[in-house]
Image (spheres, helix red, strand yellow):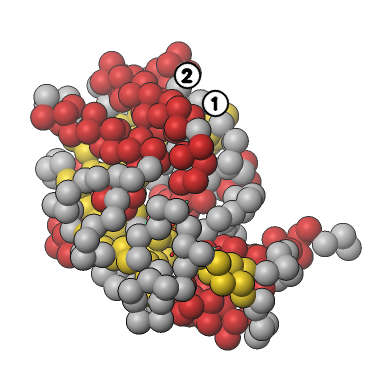
Amino acid sequence: MNTILVTGGAGYIGSHVVQQLTERGERVVVLDNLTSGFREAVGSAELVVGDVGDQALVARVLSEHRISAVLHFAAHTVVPESVRDPLKYYGNNTCKTRNLLACCVDAGVRRFLFSSTAAVYGMPTSGIADEDTPLQPINPYGMSKLMSETMLRDLGAAGAMQYVILRYFNVAGCDPQGRIGQSTPHATLLLKVACEHAVGKRPSLSIFGTDYDTPDGTGIRDYIHVEDLAAAHLRALDHLRADGESLTLNCGYGHGYSVREVIDAVQRISGRALTVIEQPRRAGDPPMLIARADRLRERLGWTPRHDDLDFIVRTALAWEQKLAADATPA
Ligand code: UD1
C-alpha cells in the first residue's frame, strides 16, 4: 500500500527525488508526459508516459498501483514564457493540478507533496522571505503555483488532504555521481547557462543588471543544491506518513550569492575565461531573494549537506561536460 506517485519525475528536480526514493527502497511510479523530461532520468522506477490532466489515466494509475502519496512536480517553469503565454501556465500548472487533486480525493489519496516556488513572494521589500511574507507573485508562473497552493490549503481545511508545500528558491547542481542532471533545452537559469558557455555550447554569457543596490551591483539569489532539496522531500514524505500536520516550507540555505560570484566560481572551477556581456536588468527580476528557511530545519529536522557554491558549480559543470561529450560524435 505504500507506492508513491511522482508526477514530473523525469524532469530535473523530480528525477533527483525519484533517485533518492528508489535508493532507499521506496516503490515509485512516475507519471510524466516527457515534454521536458527524459525517460532515462527515472532509473529503475516505473514510468507511465502520460499527462497529469488526463483524468482517466490518473484515476487508473492511482487505483492500479494503490498509491498512498503523491509528489507533484509536473509543471512549466519558465518565467518569461509565462508572461508571454499566461494561459499555458494556468492550464498546465493550475488546472491540471486541480484535476490531479480531484482524482486523489476520489481515490482516497490524502498525502500530497507540492513543488512550489519563491516566485509566490514576488519582490519582498527586504529581499528576504519567510513563509509569512505576503504572497504577491509578479508573473503568471508564480500565480499559477500560488493558485495550486490555495487549492491545497482549502482542501486541507476541508479535512480532505494532508500536504506539505515546498517553496523552492534557486535550485542548482546535479547528482554528484553524474547519473542524472539538468538537461532542459533552451535553459535560462544562470548556472546552467554559465556552464553551457564554459563547455563551449554558447559563445557568451549575459549579466542582467549591474546597477542593483547590492554589494557588486548584480542580483543575489539563494542557490540550493538539488540533492539537499530532494532530501527535504523525503523528510516531508516521512512527516506526512507519521500523520504530521500540513506545512508550508521555504527551501533555501538562508544566504545568497551574486551573479558575479556565481560566474567567478564557474570560471575558477572550469579554468575557462568566460565572455561576459553586461546587459540591462531583466524585467521582473528582484535585486535579492533569500529564504528564511529555519522552519524547514525545525519542522523536518533537515540539515543541508552541500551548502557550498563550489560544490554546486562542480556538479553542474560535470554534468554539462558529460552532455557535451555525449553530443560529440566519436
Ligand atoms: C528562479 C526560478 C524561479 C524562482 C526563483 C527563486 C526557474 C525557471 N526560475 O528564477 O521559479 O522563483 O529562482 O529565486 O526555475 N541572470 C543573469 N544572466 C543569465 C541568467 C540569469 O544575469 O543568463 C541573473 C538573473 O538576472 C538573476 C540571477 O541571475 O539575478 C538568477 O536568475 P535565474 O537563474 O534565471 O533564476 P531566477 O530568475 O531567480
Q: Residue at x 33, y 49 (%)?
A: 119
326 is higher (above) or lower (below) than 264: above
Q: Nearer the viewer, residue 306 or 137?
A: 137
- The amino acid sitting under disc 2 is Asp
| Helix, strand or loop for disc 1 | loop
Residue 102 appears in the figure = yes
Tell me the tag on residue 222. Answer: none
Q: Residue at x 29, y 51 (%)?
A: 122
- The amino acid sitting under disc 1 is Gly
| Helix, strand or loop for disc 2 | loop
Other-residue count near label 1 (Cα within 10 Å), few / some / many at <14 / 14–19 / ≥20: some
Residue 301 appears in the figure = no
Q: Nearer the viewer, residue 90 or 209?
A: 209
Q: Is residue 233 left or right of residue 300?
A: right
- Asked whether the residues under the numbered discs 1 and 2 touch, taking CB atoms below 8 Å apart as contact, a structural biologist would say yes
Residue 112 in picture, x, y percent from top left: 28, 36
Residue 65 in picture, x, y percent from top left: 41, 26
- Quarter of the rendered structure image containing ligand 1: bottom left
Q: Is residue 307 left or right of residue 278?
A: left
Residue 262 in picture, x, y percent from top left: 49, 75
Other-residue count near label 2 (Cα within 10 Å), few / some / many at <14 / 14–19 / ≥20: few
Q: In this figure, which residue is indicated by the disc labeled 2?
A: 54
What quarter of the picture does the C terminus occupy? bottom right
Residue 189 in picture, x, y percent from top left: 52, 59
Say which quarter of the image contains residue 44: top right
Q: Nearer the viewer, residue 113 or 287?
A: 287
Tell me the tag on residue 50. Answer: 1
Q: Report the number of numbered marks.
A: 2
Q: Residue furthest top?
A: 56
Say which quarter of the image contains residue 317: bottom right
What quarter of the picture does the N terminus occupy? top left
